[in-house]
Image (spheres, rainbow, N blue to C red):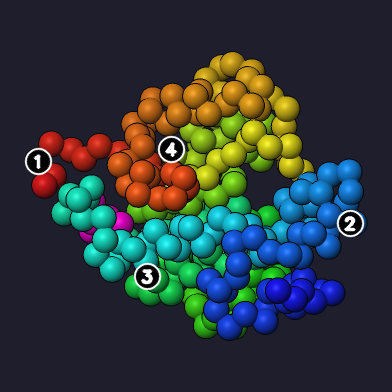
Amino acid sequence: MKTKNNCVDYFRSFKNYTDIPSRDCFAARMAKKYPDDEMAHYQDPEYVDAAYYFFGFAGKKVVGLFKALLNGRHEDVLTKTERKQFCDPKIIVDLGAGVGLLTAEMKKLFPNAIVYYVNLRGPQWDEAKKIFQKENVSIKMRESICGIPQADIVLAIYYFEHFQKMGREVCQTLKSLRPDILIDMTDPQHAFIGHFPTYRINGKTIPHTKCHREYTKLLARKNYFRHPLTKKCWNSIPKVYTKPMKEGAE
């Protein structure tokens, strides 16, 4: 596979962003530029290529999950109410959305939904605006979750690990957005830019390599539990959390 000198141009060359390979040979070229920490630059918010890479690595898995659901797969693990929640959302929020590739794809999958892009302003924000225009999708762009109404689906793809007080950020997000479904790929274990050696969760300071158990406990305290749909995903990625339905909801 050939790669252009300008990685962004290379990624833009794909007619459909879902055709971006999950792992790409541009990583080898960038590793020569960053020999001491070849992966660190991938989460540098000033580095637009990073967001393209992570869509190929992670965003495609989320898109694939929802395409499978819309095509009627995984009926064996969904109730009728859950199928409606997954396949007919009214509000979707993409947290730490980078250049907006996943945001745009979710809007195309669910054209009647209101889709929010949440990210800091900067090069990725500017790139996202270009992508939304190219894809002809209407996306609400926000710098924070303030003022966003209750969400049906929240996407937290490599998001919460960028907060040292991870527990507080999770609690504030769930309290504010109150999603029915949380699509989660929180991964604090790797030493990328924007990650921390320790995190505060459940009142404890925890090494980044041992966060997942406390993170799962925190979600359970907030009444979010891993859905069996997670096991339908390759290597359980992404993880799908939902709130138990109220009695009689069926």
> Are the residues tagged 3 and 4 within 8 Å (C-beta)?
no
- Kindly indicate the quadrant of the structure image that contains residue 127: bottom right
Residue visible at 63% across and 20% down in the picture: 206
Is the residue marked by circle 4 packed among few (<14), some (14-19), or many (20+) residues within 10 Å? Answer: few
Q: Nearer the viewer, residue 171 or 196?
A: 196
Give the mark, 3 or 4, whose residue is nearer the N terminus. 3
Number of numbered callouts drawn: 4
Q: CA distance from mark 1 to mark 3?
A: 27 Å
| Residue type (three-letter) at the residue carrying disc 1 | Gly
Given this view, does label 3 or label 2 mark the residue nearer the observer?
A: 2
Q: Establish if 136 lies above or below 125.
A: below
> Label 3 belongs to which residue?
110
SS at circle 3: loop
| Residue type (three-letter) at the residue carrying disc 2 | Lys
Residue visible at 64% across and 18% down in the picture: 205
| Residue type (three-letter) at the residue carrying disc 3 | Phe
> Label 2 belongs to which residue?
32
> Label 1 belongs to which residue?
248
**Residue 152: % across, % down:** 35, 53
> Are the residues tagged 2 and 4 within 8 Å (C-beta)?
no
Residue visible at 21% across and 40% down in the picture: 245
Q: Range of the magenta residues?
A: 82-87
Question: Outermost residue, front direction?
Answer: 1
Give the mark, 4 or 1, whose residue is nearer the N terminus. 4
